[in-house]
Each structure stands twice: as structure tokens, then as C-alpha cells.
Image (spheres, rainbow, N blue to C red):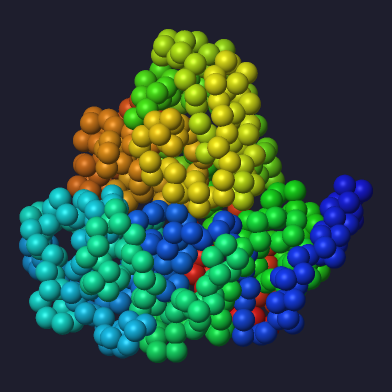
Amino acid sequence: MNLSRRNLCKVSLAAGAALSFPSILRAQARPADARTVRMVKSVGLRVFDPIWTAANITADHGIAIYDTLFALDSNFRPQPQMVGKWGVSDDQKTYTFELRDGLGWHDGTPVSAADCVASIRRWAQVAPGGRLIMERAKDISKKDDRTFMISLREPLRLLTDILADCATPCLFIMREKDAERPATEQVTTNIGSGPFKFNEALARPGSSFAYDRNEQYVPRREPSDGFAGGKLVKVDRVIWDNIADQQTALAALQAGEIDYFELPPADFFSSIDSDPDLELQVLDKGGWDAALRMNHLQKPFDNVKARQAVLHLIDQEAFMRVMNPQYGRPVTSIFGSANPVSNDENTGWYKRGGDPAKAKQLFKEAGYAGEKVVILQPTDWSAADNASQLLAEGLRKIGINAELAPSDWSGVVERRAKKGSVGDGGWSIFITDEPDFSLGNPLTDPMLTANGDEAWYGWPKNDEYEALRAKWAGADTLEERKALAREMQRIWWDFVGDVRLGTYLSPVARRKTLTGIIGMPMLIPMWNMRKS
């Protein structure tokens, strides 16, 4: 590749950053061990309970140390994982599951059916799919130490699909004594039964976390296929290094001091492409949908006119230019860009460049009186950082008192759970994203719920929409689901459950010596990786 002057400057900057790499980190970064992988994740890990939060970084931690009852293969079909045998009664109301051999907790105790029952019940407190199961469940109970049952009042054809779904929070199986804790309280241990053990002794909060191969883990015999099949760990240790400065992270990747850089800014793509030792790789080929979530409980967005104002304000092309110019495109369906139920119902609001005049008018109709609009700004996620600044600028131009609240992503995750006013430490808007694939199923994707206090962050509420979402489980054909999707989308864009900013692909950067990374939506597992 020929380097332009601009790209040459970038390479020079990276080289300079490598020379000025913090001495303590460089001292620790001995020549890379072929059995140790060092990764810089998209954001720092602060919350460890993958049921308490839906944050992807915590889900990646979860899929490393915990296991699941079922898992999606590369064709998105549910396959048994911890389950060895299972069956359903003739009336389709009673499911029986028997655990496979060889399942054990990291503390040496065996996994039991009681652990599974408690984990399902805890997950179901917060996961949309889990809530649907509980609404239809007569009982979820242990039959013996290795067998449990789910008895339903009415059939639920998609039960195993829901148990296997990768939309966060995923159904990770925890010890009964951990899963007995309410989902609103964080589990404080990191003991699972998965292919990696969390190394407590090497944990350096704010700096690095280490995961060691679980030598006692018994993988399934089937070949690895998506999240399903045998979870074969081919390295001894994986270390997540927290390098907040992205230029420094790029320099570390170029120098071979790390092997993987999860979310390189788009400005770095040409420099990575030009390096013979590095490669950009798109793991989720369906892409991610960026979204803007508003707090429906507090002013000004408790008023539908104010939410409609933001819908009209957004210039998706401009947001994609600052978030991911090489891989971004607009999206107008709440069900994503590429799902069978994606549609164009009620999308007349979309306008290239947005409509600031219309937005200003709608804020006036909402009775906006200068209330502070606090935008949570994740400074360690460059795409959302840029988008937050662009949003604040756009709001200020039409007379809105917008204020940025900078923090790392972990700080956003903690603060977005607060339902109070901005004066009490609450928030007005934050930016997030979701795999396009996940948005095809409103039963399991939390962003597609509108059940008020039980909905995902922002807590949108619309009973008519929820009544239609409840019918999804009983829709037997794709045509029925498409018809429901159009009606649901018509209502969503009227009450504005959230606002979409566009769809984009998000490549990771890795050294070419690191291979075997599994490409699936939502989660990035660490088994199957190999380092040459």
C-alpha cells in the first residue's frame, strides 16, 4: 500500500508513542510467550457480574469463566452445551434437561441441577427472554442432582432458542449460592465452570486482568462451531491490558507487546493496513447498530415531543462519519439493517442532514424550559466519544442546555442504571450499540422492550407496543412476524423508544500471529485462539 503524507504522519506518531511507552508497562512486556495472549479490550472492565449489567465487556468476562446450557452455532441454531440430553413432553409443556458429564466449578465442586435452576431464575429477573419464560412457567425445579425441568402453562416453541440467545444479559450458569443473590445486587465472586479461570492473584483493577486455562474443563466432543461445540483452549493465559490511550495501544500492537486491539479508531485503519505484521478483521459481519437512549423518566424526555425532536435532529450520515466513516451507513428500522423483519414502516422522519428546524419546533411544543440535558460521554470508546460531542453540539445549536459528563465506559455503565434526575446524579442521554443480528428478535433483545421500569436503560413505556411484542412468541410463520414487526415499528417511531444513529462494521486489529478468533455477534470468546 502506498502511504499518503497523512498516513505517514500517523505511522510516525505511532512510532513516537512506542518510544514514549510508559516504562512500567514496557518493563513488564517481556518478549511475547507463545502460550500467552495480551489483549486490549474496547473498554475497561469494572463490573464483573454479567447478569447485573448487559455491558459487552462484562459479557466477554462471563463467557470466559462461565458456561451456558445451550449455545448458538455459526448458523444461529441452538445447540446443547452444558446439557447432555433433553426432551419435551407430547403436549410441548414440560422440558427435561440432563447435564452432561464432567461439569465442575473452579472451586472443585460439581455443577448441579440446583445451580441451573437458581441461575435461570436470577437471569429471568432482568432478561426479556427470561421474563417471557417466567410468565409462562408453572415451575422450574430440580428433579435430581443432574436433572431439572421447566414446566409451562402453555407451549413456548422458542424455549431453547431463548436459553441459547447471545443478547446480553446471557444465561450464564452460576453456583446456586451466587445465583440466589437478587439480580439487582452484584455477585462478588468470579467462580464459574467455564474454560477459563479468573486469576484473582494477578488482578490489577484499572491496569490488567488475567484469565488462565481451566485444566479441569471437559469440552464437548463436537468441533467448535460459533459459540457451540468443543471449547478448546489453546493458550495458557490471556491478559486484558487496560491501555486507555489509543495511540499508545496501537504502538504496543505494532511493537508486539500486545496481540489484539479490539476497537481501533477509524483513523488508525490505514496505518494498520500498511503494517505487514498486522491485520484488520471483522468478527461480526452483520455489523452493529448505534443508538441514542434517552431517559424517559426525567425532563425533558419524559415528554414525547422532546424525544421526537431528537429523532428529527439526528443526521445519521454525520454521526457515521465521526463514528466509523469507512464502514458506516444509515439505518431506519428498529429491527436493524439485515434481518428478515427489518422494514420501512413509519420512517418518514428520516432526512439526510436531519431537520434542526423541526427539532427546535418540537422542543418548543414540549415546553422545554432550559432544563440541563446531561450526555454520558465515554472517553475510552472513541466512536461514542465523538458521537456524544457531535450530539451536544447539535443540541446547543438549537438552544438546548446540553452538558457532557465524561468518564470511562465503566462509569457510564454504573451511572446509566440511576433513574433519578440529573441533579441527583442521573442522566439524560447516552450512546450505545447493539449487534444488528440481535435486533431481529424482540423477545430477547433488551433494546426492543418498552415495559417501563422493567425495560432497558431509558425505561421506555408503551402498552400497545408491548401487547404486540407479546404476540411474537406465538407467531408461527415469518410472514406473521413481519406483519407484527411493521406494527411495532409504526408505534415505536411515534413514541420514540430510542433513536438510531446508523449501522457500522467494527473491525478488530490483531497481529497476524494470533489466529482462530471466533467471529460471532455480541461476544468475543477466547477459546480456539492460537498464537504462533
Query: Residue 243 is drawn in which quadrant?
Result: bottom right
Left or right: residue 42 compared with residue 421: right
Work out which quarter of the rendered image holds the C terminus and state it: bottom right
Image coords of residue 150 (percent x, y)? 14, 65
Image coords of residue 186 (percent x, y)? 34, 59
| One can see residue 109 in this view | yes
- Residue 363's place in the image compared with 6, above or below, is above
Kindly identify the residue that appears in the image at 8 percent across and 58 percent down. 138
Number of on-image labels: 0
Left or right: residue 519 compared with residue 243: left
Image coords of residue 358 (percent x, y)? 52, 13
- Residue 39 or 6: which is nearer the viewer? 39
- Residue 232's place in the image compared with 268, above or below, is below
- Residue 362 or 241: which is nearer the viewer? 241
Left or right: residue 273 compared with residue 200: right
| One can see residue 331 in this view | no
Kindly identify the residue that appears in the image at 15 percent across and 50 percent down. 135
- Residue 473's place in the image compared with 92, above or below, is above
Kindly identify the residue that appears in the image at 13 percent across and 65 percent down. 140
